[in-house]
Image: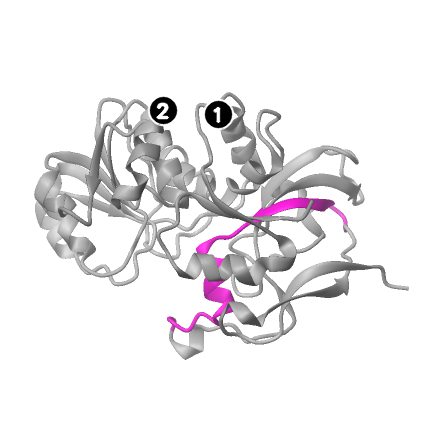
Amino acid sequence: MTEMMKAVRLHEFGGPEVLRYEEAPKPVAGAGEVLVRLHAASLNPPDLYLRDGYRALPPEWRPSGDFPLILGTDISGAVASVGDDVTQFSVGDEVYSMVRFPHDLMTGSNAYADYVKVPVSDLALKPEGIDHAHAAGAPMSLLTAWQFLVELGHNAPNPFQDFDHTPIALEGKTVLVNGAGGGVGHLALQLAKWKGAHVIAVASGKHEAVLRDLGADVFIDYTKEAAETVAKDVDLVIDAVGGANLERFLTIIREGGALYLVNPLGFSGYEEAARRGIAVSITQVRSSGAQLAEAGRLLNDGTIRVVIDSTFPLAQASDAHARASKGSIQGKIILSAR
């Protein structure tokens, strides 16, 4: 007889209201996998895109909709069981992970559930110095910032460009973080500071106090003044927002500098960047338990902090998605299962 659990499932694409909290089969850890009992999960943009059926993409690129789907990638919890040949983790270990990303980009990685099976390679011990909610808020955003700014950590083909992304040295450099109040942005700010950079944070005014507390040297409220009219001679811009007219940042980057695009869709400034001697680079975040273990030391000692925007019970995932759809998120939105 199949054991059951509670999960948030998707039976059709659409708005937050299509998310259903219901009974679902409990997964079983296979060889090289660990079954994690969820304490918390977090929302990330791919969760919203998949729930909506990736409608921004051309029809031929959209997911097939093999329902029901369980969204989510970022988890924190405790090991409930281990599969064959697993020796790195034991039952009861507190762990966190970004699960099977981007491998399950179009199907969901099943994080919005009481139990999640995770490949050992994606898993790391949860930093003891933080709780499950803050640990769940870290993985995708932290790994994105880490792989852009610290170490790529893999040799998988880059879907966005025909060369590997290589982080530049940041000590003594000026780094501008656009979208510094969001999940990726507030962690990129802190990693850049840790690496010895002078950091300019760009966000709406509501984020100023938090971002200065996290280490921003300069704050620009984009609702009052455009960053490209204020900043100058920047060594690196990392844009965590995306959208139209990202080319505007090329005017403030010094020759030999770089522009990193977390979401490159719509960017058309490659020729201008080449004329100005600016490197434009993009990468796709990938799961890495090893990098979470390394970055976890910074979470554990408070060098890096995860900011939580809001917390919802797992059963109210639709409300959490509605909150995400309103925008102006400060840090991460968390789903609590315990």
Give the residue pinned by disc 1.
298
Q: Is residue 111 shown to the viewer in this render?
A: no
Q: How is the image coloured?
A: one colour
Where's the C terminus, which quadrant? top right
Q: Position of residue 207 (x, y in %)?
A: 31, 40
- Decide if residue 109 is on the left or right side of residue 80: left
The reply to whether the C-beta atoms of the residues labelled 1 and 2 are less than 8 Å apart is yes
Highlighted range, magenta: 30-57
Give the residue pinned by disc 2.
194
Q: Is residue 276 shown to the viewer in this render?
A: yes
19 over 89 or under it: above or below: below
Q: Position of residue 94 (x, y in %)?
A: 69, 34
Disc sitting over residue 313 in the figure: none
* Nearer-the-camera pick, 285 or 206: 206
Q: Residue at x 44, y 57 (%)?
A: 324
* Nearer-the-camera pick, 222 or 156: 222
Q: Secondary structure at mark 2?
A: helix
Q: Residue furthest right?
A: 1
